[in-house]
Amino acid sequence: MTSPGVVIVGAGQSAAVAARALREHGYRGRITMLGRERHRPYERPPLSKAVLVAAEEPRLDVLTEESWARSNIDLLSSSDAVALDLLQRHVRLADGQVLEYEMCLIATGGEASTLASAPPANPRVHYVRTLDDARRLRAALQRAPQVAILGGGFLGLEIANSALSVGAAVTVLERATSLLDRFLPPEASAWLESVMREAGARLLLGAFVSGVDSLPSGRLHLTTNAGDLEVDEVVVAIGLSPNDALARDAGLEIAAGGGILVDASCRTSNEHVFACGDCTSQQRPRQAAPRRLESWQNANEQARTAAAAMLGAPLPAPAVPWFWTDQGEHNIQVLGVPAPDLEYVRRGDPAANKALWIGHRGAVPLHGVAVNAGSDLRAIRPLFERGRPVQLEDFQLDTINLRAWAKQMQADAVATV
Amino acid sequence: MDWIKVASAEELRNDEAKTVNVAGYGVALYRIEDEFFATDSMCTHATALLSEGFVEDGCVECPLHQGRFDVRTGKAMCAPVTVDLRTHAVKREGDDIYVLSPVGK
């Protein structure tokens, strides 16, 4: 009897990269991929940008045509896995089909968190998580509407910039009193706020919505603590909930804050089941508690780790968390993980739209933030990988060559071992 | 087939890049040790100049999303880039660096 092979539940970024990695490691068994959507695995970062506004929808496939063919994946699209049986080692689909597995990889991603007052069923309310969601919002934006965006996080602001670029009137309502204050140093947050206002967004900070009502005209009336407002469309971007229900119901361990608990090799609490991407919460070495990372990089890195671990191959070196967001003309990148007690030093000038911050504890770089300075952040990445103190005075001097400084700091770190 | 003088060797240090003008066309010029290479300056994935990218181990990383290209061959090395970059012939005469004009190719 042939082995039932690997069943991948989910067909997004992480699922596709894992399947390809299994083949790259020489895996020749069967790979079955279960996708809830009707599409092949596609890239999500463009959903809030090019898909909304570009003249032509960009190519979104995670794997090129050639790579897809070579990976030899049996994709069952529009299929919903409803139960995972850890003892029988099978996955049951909504249509009753049962798929046995030798190893299972859960890559179910996440779903947009919903706001009770703005249910997704309302045709004027948009949540942007899937390609079909983005296409529907794109159609609405072509009417140059008045839009309220609930949530001023990275996604909400990207959508705001996209909407502004096609002539929509945009109001962003954010509960916090400054933008992205958990992810950016105050100077970068203030810069982003000014950039958004210059682009024409009306920003309501410290604002929240208590009611969204449809008017006879079809427009929506919003009741907020900052006054009432009337718009054509509402976009809700208040975060992501990990799709961990299948794992939870199967009895796999779930992390305290949600997400399927996985170890450094992306293995769940069951030895035959792995998980990767947005649906996970990972316990890494030297980390106090498991952590969820919702990013394109994490989806890719965990996919490669899971594939290697499933086949008993050496695990790729863990990467420092890295994240980017394109806000209109501006590119923001974040390296490492923020913490409330970090101190920040800066190089460059946000007023000139180019700056780089290092958040550090005792001169050990832990959190890097770049505004239109991605290459500079890339040049200092080895210092975040090393985790040793660096000399931060020179970093702030424009007269010092950053790359030379980074190389010197690496050499010093070695010398002090 | 025109060779256009675009730079002097000392304008670039090892692992540096800059945009040069070749017959009105923006080209990214790279220095890897004492060799020079040229590619299209625009990333094949997003609106970004590779001349502002990070050069290491013979590859350039896009400043926006860290897609990586081999500067010798233009080959797209890792996601999110999938489309190869066009390369341009480079020759060095003394300290002068020439790029073959892409116009009329």
Image (cartoon, coloured by chain):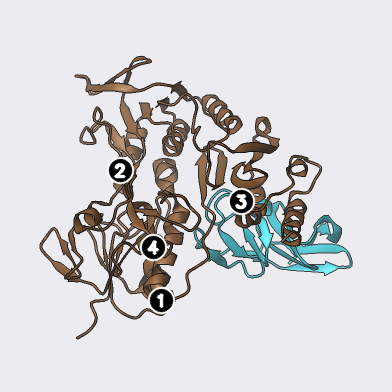
- The chain displayed brown equals A
Q: Where does label 4 land, which residue? A: A266
Identify residue for label 2.
A133
Looking at the rendered image, the disc whose residue lies closer to the viewer, 3 or 1, is 1
Distance between the alpha carbons at the discs numbered 3 and 1: 34 Å
Crowd class of label 4 (few under 14; some 14 to 19; many from 20; radius 10 Å): many
> Answer yes or no: do the residues labelled 2 and 4 have beta carbons within 8 Å?
no
Whole-Å distance between the Cαs marked 1 and 4? 12 Å
The amino acid type, in three-letter code, at marker 1 is Gly
Q: Quadrant of residue A4?
A: bottom left
Q: Which residue is mark 3?
A: B63
Q: Position of residue B21 (x, y in %)?
A: 74, 53
Q: Is residue A200 left or right of residue A344?
A: left
- Residue furthest top in the image: A227
What number is the disc on residue A312? Answer: 1
Same chain shared by disc 2 and disc 3: no
Chain represented in cyan: B
- The picture quadrant where one finds residue A170 is top left
Amino acid type at circle 4 is Cys
Whichever of labels 2 and 1 marks the residue nearer the N terminus, that label is: 2
Q: Circle 3 marks a residue in which chain?
A: B
